[in-house]
Amino acid sequence: MPPVIDKRALLATLKDQLARELERSAERARDAADAATHEENRAEGDKDMRATEASYVARGHTERVLQIEQALARLGAVTVRDFGPGDAIASSALVELESGPRRALYFLLPAAGGERMQVQGVEVQTLATTSPLGTALLGLSEGDEAEVATPQGTRVYLITGVR
């Protein structure tokens, strides 16, 4: 297991990272909405799709803003707890997994899966409890194996550490 990592600080770092992404996404959403209604995007014929395409881009950016806002709200309700080797994995667990030669450290949370952070020289990736791997880990403990069906076949993960 890597050095001791303060999970409360890790959660705060994640929230800060998401808040910055929210600002950038909100700016892109505003720019895309302005572009969708700009006079240069007015249709010049029935086959001209500029305004429609611009509105799709604006909608995508707006949906991303909503996703980040929802993730921040869910993360605000997270209670960080400590786990020991025999404890069942649940939300806020820091889990080290081994799959073949690859080792990875995951911070299990109810939202914002897939975010990466560098802490004390170690990469930590967030893992949503609703993801296939997150769901497979819930209730297991150190020494157990989690099996996850992937398009490439079943992947087996050995749980080598839980904090």
Image (cartoon, helix red, strand yellow):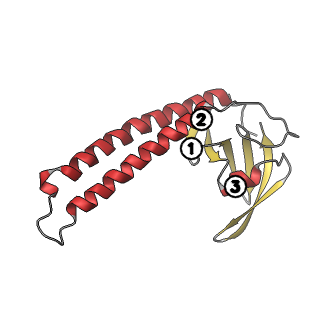
Residue hosting label 2? 75
User: Which callout, 3 or 2, points at the residue further toward the start of the chain?
Assistant: 2
What label sits on residue 133 in the rendered view?
3
Instruction: Tell me residue 115's x, y (percent).
Output: 55, 44
User: Which callout, 1 or 2, points at the residue further toward the start of the chain?
Assistant: 2
In-front residue for pair 120/24 = 24
Q: How many marks?
A: 3
Instruction: Tell me residue 102's x, y (percent).
Output: 69, 55
The kind of residue on which mark 2 rests is Leu
In-front residue for pair 39/15 = 39
For label 1, the crowd category at 10 Å Cα-Cα, with few meaning under 14, some 14 to 19 and many 20 or more, is many
Say what secondary structure mark 3 lies in. Answer: helix
The kind of residue on which mark 1 rests is Ala
Compared to 137, does 22 lie above or below? Answer: above
Residue at 27% over, 47% down: 33
In-front residue for pair 106/79 = 79
Mark 3 or 2, which is nearer the eye? 2
Q: Quadrant of residue 80?
A: top right
Instruction: Tell me residue 91's x, y (percent).
Output: 71, 40
21 relative position to 90: left or right: left
Q: CA distance from mark 3 to mark 1?
A: 14 Å
Residue hosting label 1? 112
For label 2, the crowd category at 10 Å Cα-Cα, with few meaning under 14, some 14 to 19 and many 20 or more, is some
The kind of residue on which mark 3 rests is Leu
Residue at 48% over, 38% down: 69
Marks 1 and 2 in Cβ contact (< 8 Å): yes
